Image (cartoon, grey):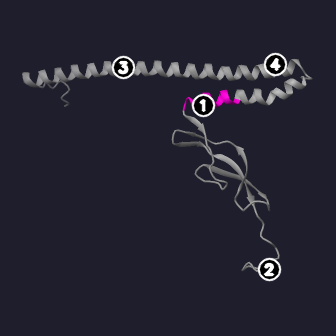
């Protein structure tokens, strides 16, 4: 037989302590729920700000595209200003990312730092030393201390001289 209807007796001191602890837990629960609501409100506001800033970038790109669609033969002045206009949109976009601690990786050496770079191709070159970065294909970004996306690079590949022996002496 099971004792589902077992009655437990506790003394008044233990009862008061349990009631006090339950009251504290209920207060903590209310504080945590309020804190969670505040965090959700803050996160929603931050997300809305991000979307509004990205929409500014999209608006600038739309304006450029609209002009090009409506002017199939743009003026030489427009073509001359186009790189500066695109650069301004890019700066705006990078500032949106920078506000969120997402910053481009700046490479300090001509040789790849494999903590920051990914070599995606090699090209035969004779004008620079082997393993020298010859081209940045895609910019890398870090988010705080984390490498979110490594910089993708092409490095030089110096072919050994076919007339050299294994020990480096010319035959």
Residue where numbered disc 2 is placed = 170
Judge by depth and name the residue closer to the eye, 12 or 74.
74
Residue where numbered disc 4 is placed = 66
| Mark closest to the chain's N terminus, 1 or 2 | 1
| Mark closest to the chain's N terminus, 2 or 4 | 4
Task: Name the dominant secondary structure of the magenta segment.
Answer: helix
Give yes or no for residue 85 being in the magenta stretch. no
| Residue 146 as seen in the image, left or right of residue 129 | left
Residues under numbered marks 3 and 4 in contact, where contact means CB atoms less than 8 Å apart:
no
Q: Tell me which segment is drawn in magenta.
A: 90-100
For mark 4, give the secondary structure: helix
Give the x, y percent position of residue 78. Answer: 85, 24
| Mark closest to the chain's N terminus, 1 or 3 | 3
Residue where numbered disc 1 is placed = 97
Residue 10 seen: no
| Mark closest to the chain's N terminus, 2 or 3 | 3
Residue 130 seen: yes
- In this view, the mark in front (3 or 4): 4
For mark 2, give the secondary structure: loop
For mark 1, give the secondary structure: helix
| Residue 12 as seen in the image, left or right of residue 138 | left
Q: Give me the C-alpha separation between circle 3 and circle 4.
A: 48 Å
Q: Give me the C-alpha separation between circle 2 and circle 4.
A: 63 Å
> Which numbered tag is attached to residue 45?
none
Q: Above or below — where is 129 with respect to 168? A: above
């Amino acid at each position: 037989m099971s004792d589902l209807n077992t009655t437990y007796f506790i003394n008044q001191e233990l009862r008061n302590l349990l009631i006090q602890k339950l009251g504290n837990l209920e207060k903590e629960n209310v504080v945590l729920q309020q804190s969670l609501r505040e965090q959700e409100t803050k996160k929603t506001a931050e997300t809305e700000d991000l979307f509004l800033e990205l929409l500014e970038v999209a608006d600038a790109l739309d304006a450029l595209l609209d002009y090009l669609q409506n002017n199939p033969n743009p003026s030489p002045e427009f073509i001359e200003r186009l790189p500066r206009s695109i650069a301004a949109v890019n700066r705006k976009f990078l500032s949106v990312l920078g506000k969120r601690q997402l910053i481009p990786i700046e490479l300090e050496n001509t040789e790849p730092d494999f903590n920051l770079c990914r070599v995606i191709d090699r090209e035969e070159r004779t004008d620079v030393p082997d393993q020298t970065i010859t081209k940045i294909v895609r910019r890398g970004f870090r988010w705080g201390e984390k490498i979110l996306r490594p910089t993708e690079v092409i490095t030089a590949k110096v072919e050994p001289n076919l007339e050299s022996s294994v020990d480096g002496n010319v035959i």
